[in-house]
Image (cartoon, coloured by chain):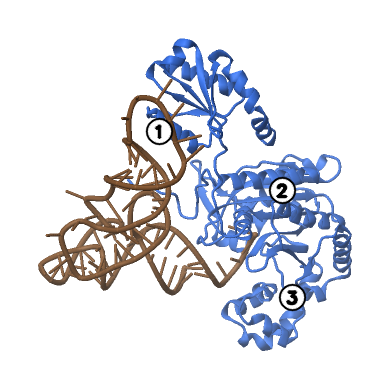
Amino acid sequence: MHVQRPRGTSDILPGSVERWQELERVAREVFARYGYREIRTPVFEHTEVFERGVGETTDIVQKEMYTFTDRAGRSVTLRPEGTAGVIRAFVENKLYGQTGVAKLYYIGPMFRYEKPQKGRERQFHQYGCEVLGSDGPAIDAEVIALNVDTLTNFGLRGLVVELNSVGCPDCRPRHRERMLEALRPYAAELCDDCRSRLEKNPLRIFDCKRGCPAVLERAGAPTVLKSLCEACETHLSGVRAHLDALGVPYVINERLVRGLDYYTRTAWEVTSAGFGTVGGGGRYNRLVAELGGPDVPGIGFAVGMERAILLRQEQAGQDGAADRQAGLDVFVAVADSSAELPAARLLQALRQVGLVADRDYQGRGLKAQFKLADRMRARYAAVLGESEVTRGVVTVKDLTTGAQTELPVDRAAAELARVAGQSSGERKEQA
RNA sequence: GUGAGCAUGGCGAAGUGGUUAACGCACCGGAUUGUGGUUCCGGCAUUCGUGGGUUCGAUUCCCACUGCUCACCCCA
C-alpha cells in the first residue's frame, strides 16, 4: 500500500526543520521582549466558537472549515485561525480579572480546507498575538511594531506595512450607504464577483484584482478612510503618530480590507513586493463580548510561518540548501569484534561527558567507518581493536590533521572533552 | 469552487511506436593485511503514477482515475 500524506499537508524533514526551529525561537524571543506570554489552546474547538468568532459570512466559515461530529454527536472544528480560540480561553478562564492588559501569543498549526498552492496549505502554521483590554492607539502601534520586529529578527528585509482603518459600527453603515449610492449607476461595469459584493460587502470591491477599483474611482465612491467618524479619525492619527515615534515606516492603503468580520478601526498587512502578504492583523473591539466575555477591546496579528520561511529562502537567493546536521566531536570506530563492548562503553562515556559522539551500526569495515566519520564531519576518530583492548588504550586520530595518539580508555572521555570541549561548549550554549 | 501544466530509479533529469530505458548526484562495494576526505573501477529502474483502450507491439498515441504544481477566488 502506498500511503501518502493528505493533500495540503507537508512533512517537515531534518534539513529544513531547522528553519522552523529558528523562526519559532526568534518569535518567542521577541514576544518575550515585548512582555507577551504564551498561551496554548486546543487545535479544535466547538464549531460555534469559530462561527461566532470569525464571522458567519466569511469564506473561512462558509467553506473552509474542517468540521466534523465527534462520537457524541457534537460538532467540532479544527481551528482555522488563532484568535477565536484565544479569546474563548480568555473569557472561559476569566483572564480579564487580572491587572493590566492581557498580552498573549500563540504558535501552532491551523487548518483550512482550501486548494493548496504556493505558500498555502491545508495545515499551515501561524504565530500571532492578542492584546486584550486597551483601545488606545499606542497599543495598535506597538502590536504593528512587534509584528514587523519578529519578521526582521528572522532576517526578512524589504517589508512594507500597509495600514488602513476600516471604521467602526458607527461610521461603517454610513460609508456603506455613500458607496452604494455612488456605485449603483455603475453596477454593470463591475465584474460578476463585485456585483454580488455590492450589497453584501461593498468594501471588498476595493480589494478586487480586476478592473473594479477603477470603476470605484470613476463613480467617485468614497474610501472608508474618507468616511471615518471623528473618533475613528482621531484613533487613526494617534496610531500614525505612534508609528512615527517608534520609527516604523508604513504606507496608507485605502484599499486594504481584511477578510474577517470582527475587525474594527486599525487593519494592516505586512507585505513584501512581488511576494504578497506575510502577516497581518487588526483591531477587534466587539469580539470578546461576542464570545460571552466583558466588553473589552482587543487587537492582534498573525504571521503565516510557511510564508515567512518561503520569503526568507527567496531573499537568501535560490540556494535553498538544506541545513546539515551538526558535526560530531568523536566517531567511535570498532576495528575488531572483540572491541564491540569496550567501544559501546567508550561511546556512552563520551556522550556522558557532553560530547557529540556516534558510531557505525551496520558492521562495516574499518575503512568504511572512516568514510562514515568523514561524512558525519567528525573531528576525532576513536579506534578500538584487539590490540587496544588488550592494552587498555584507545587510538585517537585527529581527522583534520591526521595526527594519531593513544590514550588510556578510562581517561579518554575526559581527555577528549578537554580538547574538544571548546567548540562543543559553544554549541551547547546556543541550544 | 474554476482554469492550466506535469507525472521516468532515493533525488535531479534525457529519451523513443519495436530486441539491453542515457547521464549527473546520492548510495553500496573494490583498488592486498586495522585508517578517511581526492582519484580510478564496478554495482544500483524485469521498468517509465494507476486502470482501461488503440496496435503485431506502448514508457512513448487515446480515455478515465489519482496525485503534484501553478494561477484565480480568498487568505496567513
**Label 1 to label 2, Cα distance in Å?**
58 Å
Instruction: Answer above or below: position of A119 versus A348.
Output: below
Q: Position of residue A191 (x, y in %)?
A: 59, 81
Q: Position of residue A337 (x, y in %)?
A: 38, 19
| Structural crowding at the residue carrying mark 1, measured as other residues with C-alpha within 10 Å and reported as few (<14), some (14–19) or many (≥20) | few
Q: Which residue is mark 2?
A: A87
Residue under mark 1: which chain is it in?
A
Q: Which residue is mark 1?
A: A368
Q: Is residue A131 left or right of residue A358?
A: right
Chain colored blue = A
Closest to the camera, between mark 1 and mark 2, is 1
Q: Position of residue A274 (x, y in %)?
A: 63, 69
Chain colored brown = B
Q: Quadrant of residue B68?
A: bottom left
- Mark 1 in CB contact with mark 3 (< 8 angstroms): no
Q: Kindly identify the amino acid type of the residue bearing the numbered disc 2.
A: Ile
The answer to whether residue A146 is seen in the rendering is yes
Task: Identify which residue, A371 or A27, lies in the foreground.
Answer: A371
Instruction: Answer above or below: position of A422 versus A223.
Output: above
Q: Earlier in the sequence, mark 3 or mark 2?
A: 2
Numbered label attached to residue A176: 3
Q: Position of residue B64 (x, y in %)?
A: 31, 66
**Label 3 to label 2, Cα distance in Å?**
29 Å
